[in-house]
Image (cartoon, helix red, strand yellow):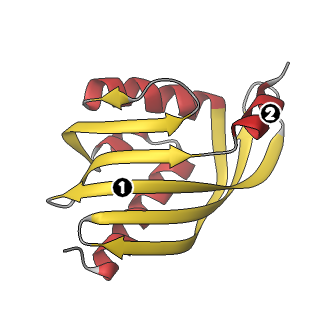
């Protein structure tokens, strides 16, 4: 069972690394055989090499200006988070505010699965050239 303070510290590390665009710091949070999925934006990635590729692609495309947790639910080794997000698409310069939801499964202090739900219609608007 996860301690809420530890969960909040973990999520803060994730938030700070993503805002900084620090892929290496993000990867430290994942288990070696973790799965990372952004629903609606392609297939998931399994393992750190595949996750690195996916994260680098997202970091190159989207700058996270602000990413603030609104609600955190902890149930055993499972975490559900609702975030308020302000993001900028690097190619178009367009920015938007939205909410995202993340569902994480943890093991030994590392993320073994992260599934993110985001507004894919908004992503299409931000990325349209």
Which residue is found at the position 41% from the left and 29% from the top?
A: 44
Residue 70 is situated, as x and y percent measured from the top left of the image, at 60, 73
Write down the residue under mark 1.
104
- Who's the residue at 56% across and 46% down the image? 117
Q: Looking at the rendering, in which quadrant would you find the C terminus? A: top right
Expressed as whole percent of the image width and height from the top left, the position of residue 31 reads: 20, 44
Residue at x 33% of width, y 80% of height: 4
- In the orientation shown, which residue stands out farthest toward the left? 108
Label 2 or label 1, whichever lies nearer to me, is: 1
- Residue 126: image tag: 2
Q: Is residue 42 left or right of residue 4?
A: right
Horizontal and vertical percent for residue 6? 29, 75
Quarter of the N terminus within the rendering:
bottom left
Q: Is residue 46 above or below residue 22?
A: above
Q: Give the Cα separation between the discs numbered 2 and 1.
A: 26 Å
Q: Regarding mark 2 in the picture, which secondary structure is present there?
A: helix
Q: In the image shown, does 51 or 75 lie closer to the viewer?
A: 75
Q: Earlier in the sequence, mark 2 or mark 1?
A: 1
**SS at badge 1:** strand
Q: Quadrant of residue 50?
A: top left
Q: Residues within 10 Å of mark 2 (few under 14, many from 20)?
A: many
Q: Image height check: is 73 above or below 24?
A: below
Residue 56 point in image, percent of width and height: 48, 28
Label 1: few (<14), some or many (≥20) within 10 Å? some
Asked which quadrant contains residue 30, the reply is: top left
Could you say which is closer to the camera, residue 92 or residue 45? Answer: 45
Rendering quarter of residue 123 = top right
Q: Residue at x 25, y 30 (%)?
A: 47
Residue 48 falls left or right of residue 125: left
Q: Nearer the viewer, residue 22 or 27?
A: 27
């Amino acid at each position: 069972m996860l301690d809420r303070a530890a969960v909040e510290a973990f999520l803060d590390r994730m938030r700070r690394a993503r805002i900084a665009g620090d892929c290496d710091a993000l990867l430290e949070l994942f288990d070696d055989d973790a799965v990372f999925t952004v629903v609606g934006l392609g297939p998931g990635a399994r393992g750190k090499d595949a996750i690195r590729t996916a994260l680098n692609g997202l970091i190159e495309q989207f700058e996270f200006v602000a990413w603030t947790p609104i609600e955190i639910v902890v149930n055993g080794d499972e975490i559900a988070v609702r975030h308020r997000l302000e993001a900028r698409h690097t190619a178009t310069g367009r920015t938007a505010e939205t909410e995202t939801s993340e569902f994480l499964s943890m093991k030994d202090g590392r993320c073994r699965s992260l599934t993110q739900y985001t507004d894919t219609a908004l992503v299409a608007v931000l990325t349209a050239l």
